[in-house]
Amino acid sequence: MLKLLLAATSLGVVADAGAAPPRPDVPGYALGQATLARAPYSMADLTALQKSMLFGADDVAALRQSKAILADQTEAILDVWYGFVASTPELVVFFGDTRSGQPDANYLGAVRKRFALWILDTADATYDQAWLDWQYEIGLRHNRLKKNKTDGAHGPAQVDFRYLPALTIPITTTLKPFLAKKGASVADVERMHAAWVKAVLMQAILWSHPYIKDGEF
Ligand code: HEM
């Protein structure tokens, strides 16, 4: 444990100015847009969170490495993730139309386009203020404050909080075979997978802000 704590203290700020993110023409996609509200957590809060998760420069490098590997596999990955949600009644209900009680194909399809961009955004996240503001927005979109609004959907009012961090596990477990498909070494696949687990959990934590009582985040 002591070693872990010592290693943690040696991790510096993991922020990356990076290039301006692309702005694909996908309805509702808003990374980098000035219209987004400013996140209620700061860059210093992000740095502290990254330190607490042992998220460091090696993880950023592993995520970057994963981008080229995943770039032409996003549709296949989404088939697996959507397949998991579709076959899990406790989850698919959040994509349902409360009027018909059935899954809403238009809603699922609209979100899927942004989900594909999210995969590559996670691989080359800039960890700057624009990225932070987008995380806050995605959290709002899972919460009752903004769910359904982007796509004009008629789904349940919110994704219940407990499922947000939980989904880190199926998302990253099912991603691993895709990381291994392009000839990376076993060690590199392990590194990329570990970085993805941290990156997804980090986002689920940031997205949880609207669910938590004022002053308790
Ligand atoms: C680690 C956990 C999760 C990740 C990485 C994730 C990822 C995403 C992404 C990337 C979007 C699109 C955001 C946008 O661009 O608008 C989204 C939206 C959405 N997700 Fe999740 N999600 C997670 C947990 C969940 C869970 C557990 C559910 C329950 C089924 C869920 C249901 C939804 C719904 C319904 C939307 C659309 C929200 C809206 O109305 O705008 N998500 N999610």
Image (spheres, helix red, strand yellow):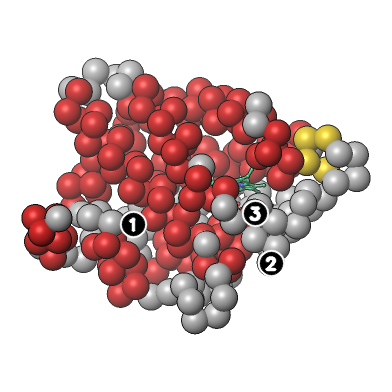
For image coordinates 25% across by 54% down, the residue present is 55
Residue type at tag 2: Leu
Q: Is mark 3 within 8 Å of ligand 1?
A: yes
* Quadrant including the N terminus: bottom left
Residue type at tag 1: Thr
**Label 3: element kind:** loop
Which mark, residue 126? 1
The answer to which of marks 3 and 1 sits earlier in the sequence is: 1
Residue 147 image offset from top left, x and y in percent: 70, 57
For image coordinates 61% across by 38% down, the residue present is 112
In the displayed structure, would residue 212 be above or below residue 56? Answer: below
Check contact, mark 2 vs mark 3: CB within 8 A: no
Comparing labels 2 and 3, the label whose residue is closer to the camera: 3
Q: Residues within 10 Å of mark 2 (few under 14, many from 20)?
A: some
The answer to which of marks 2 and 3 sits earlier in the sequence is: 2
Q: Residues within 10 Å of mark 3 (few under 14, many from 20)?
A: some
Which mark, residue 160? 3
- Residue placed farthest to the bottom in the image? 215
The answer to whether any part of residue 153 appears in the image is no
- Residue placed farthest to the right in the image? 99
Comparing labels 1 and 2, the label whose residue is closer to the camera: 2
For image coordinates 55% across by 80% down, the residue present is 214
* Residue where numbered disc 2 is placed: 145
Residue 138 image offset from top left, x and y in percent: 56, 57
Q: Is residue 58 left or right of residue 36?
A: left
**Label 1: element kind:** loop
Disc 2 from disc 3: Cα separation: 13 Å
